[in-house]
Image: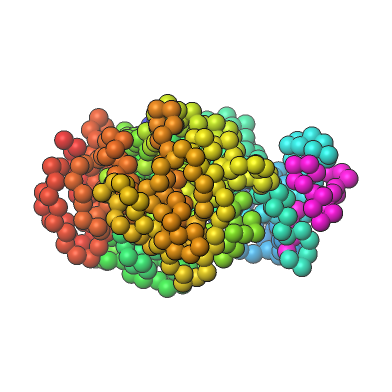
Amino acid sequence: MNDVIKLDNFLFGGDYNPDQWLKSPEILKKDIEMFVEARVNVVSLGIFAWSAYEPVEGEFHFEWLKEIIDNLYNNGIYTVLATPSGARPKWLADKYPEVLRVNKDRRRIGFGMRHNHCHTSSVYREKVYIINRKLAETLGDHPGVILWHISNEYGGECYCDSCQKAFQNWLKDRYQTIDRLNDEWVTAFWSHTYNSFEQIEAPGTMELGEWAMNPLLLNWRRFVTFITKDFMKNEIKALRDAGNQKPATTNFMYDYDGLNYKKFSDIVDIVSWDNYSRWHKFEDIEVAYDTAFQHDLMRGIKHKPFMLMESCPTAVNWQSISKLRWPRLAETAGLQAVAHGSDTVMYFQMRQARAGMEKLHGALISSYGEKDDRIYEECVSLGKRLEGLGRCNSGQVPVQTAFVYDRENIWALEDSFGPRNKDMGIKSLTNKMYKGLRRANLNVEIVDMEDELTGYKLVVAPLAYLHRAGFADKVRKFVTAGGVFVTSYWFGIVDEDDKMHLGAVPHELTDVMGLRETEVDGLFDGMKYKILKAQGATDKLKEEYSFDMLCNLVEPTTAKTLMTYGSDFYAGTPAVLVNEFGEGKAYYLGAHAEDAFYEDLFDYIVEEAGLDRIIEEKLPYGVELSSRYLGDQEKVFLQNFTRNEIAIDTKVYNGTLKAYETVVCDKC
Ligand code: GLA
Ligand code: ZN
């Protein structure tokens, strides 16, 4: 399948909790029978099974697990084996309360729930190391085990004394001297100068502590990523110390803001993530683009195919309303992941839990437990479809376009006060620009500022407010060498510690952009302004578009104006500009405009820059188009994300797509 797992076929399956059914052998038997019929060839086991592995301290029981893995393997089903650190047994929390997390309000939590341990507790690290090592020694070599699933959805943060100490040490490493930290953070502001690293405390709640000091907030977030990764390294070390070299992953979450996942790229062998799209809550094609962005984001972490580790064939039970899925949506959503580079379609959960918080969560096998169940039938159909796709081969997604989405920049944007505390439009501008690119029939790779830009033809970087990792230099080189660069308002304003650049901005890029940003305007909710086409600008652009939220005023030097503002005291000044620099071009999009603007502009840019489109024909709104190599063949995926039939007339496919139908065809 894949250069990491080394299997040929797509994997189909998901989280399976037989530890909840050990006293019901008839259920376990039926599960296997139904899995086989649905072409299930992988399950994830043991994610929350610590109390079954080690019911009392130091007493280990893996026989039951071995029997399950054997049985699955004998039926052609592989195991992704989890380390159980996501939830600990009661005896552990009772005996070693320091393993439990201290919240931001500085109070230690009691036993309960999951995903709430301290990352620096030496006892917890030791206990996790022991259980992981035992697990690896006992079952790691089983031929059925193909991958380690480290913990589950790492997230959150701990504010205990030991975590505070680790934060101080991390800061010491980063800044070396307290003077340097004071300078970089400009702590003279409001008299917050520190005399030593020991005086520094993690951010607190509004009532308690330092909650609004930007460089502290930003560096605390960086530290949380560092310490979570460090915790994960300790988990993996236990497996390697046991002599096991099987690949490892950990399941990431949708647009999770608590960690910079890119930093995990060197310790996960393959990226995996859990997708719970809010189908039917909004227009499905919009949900589809939003989901597609997440798939691309996950593929971009290692620039390689990834795994869809969890999703749901029907409604989940933790969103505010559990809406049933339309027929065929499960299949099309699964194939969408594949189209964007997933080598798996996996679900939470394989069998519906009997009790607890997740008893009403959708599953491949429901509590009814028989084959004549609508969702099970849909799963069978998808299983067969995946099998029919043939060799997976970990095919790449061909891309010429990169989209810069940098978590540290997003943190800085979110925590900064002004220019629009209500909503900077990060999510909506991202969605609009991404959709514009996809509507122009492009595949897109999501990168961050640490990535290289060479090799792409088009780089889009909205709201790139904080530059780090030599980003300005990368942009300069990229444009000089002939690349097309597109950015938005609020570009190149602060340094890595969120400190304002002095002088003209965008910092170090005023010549590349051919302009200077002067003032930024936050619009009140409900205010809709206009941008108007400048004389002589391309016919691809309409005469006017609306915008809201934010806009940047600029003073051009060499940039040419494509559109001007049509409202307020700045009417008539440039809003959208392009600058020729070196062999390339740099576009500046000054306002948060309506969707049509991005669609029209990217259509123009793609044509002008001579980028390869997946297909030439423009498709009706509602159809998502992507392509990916399967084996040696580039396959084109056409997916109808609406409830209507849509007629398609293209060189690769001519016919009608039913509601939520996917066709996969060869790229001719
Ligand atoms: C997350 C978790 C799973 C399960 C699902 C429910 O993704 O990883 O254990 O709780 O949510 O949707
Ligand atoms: Zn802690």
Please identify the quarter of the rendering in which residue 510 is found.
top right
Please identify the quarter of the rendering in which residue 2 is found.
top left
Report x, y in % for residue 423.
Answer: 54, 63
Q: Is residue 428 above or below residue 171?
A: below
Please identify the quarter of the rendering in which residue 496 is found.
top right
- Residue at 58 percent across and 43 percent down: it is 505
Q: Is residue 64 above or below residue 422?
A: above
Which quadrant is the N terminus positioned in? top left
Determine if residue 659 is in view.
yes
- Residue at 30 percent across and 40 percent down: it is 606
Range of the magenta residues? Answer: 181-205
Report x, y in % for residue 204.
Answer: 74, 60
Q: How is the image coloured?
A: rainbow
Q: Is residue 239 magenta?
A: no
Which residue occupies the foreground of this view, 245 or 105?
Answer: 105
Which residue occupies the foreground of this view, 344 or 238?
Answer: 344
Of all residues, the one furthest to the right in this rendering is: 195
Determine if residue 155 is in view.
no
- Residue at 52 percent across and 46 percent down: it is 555
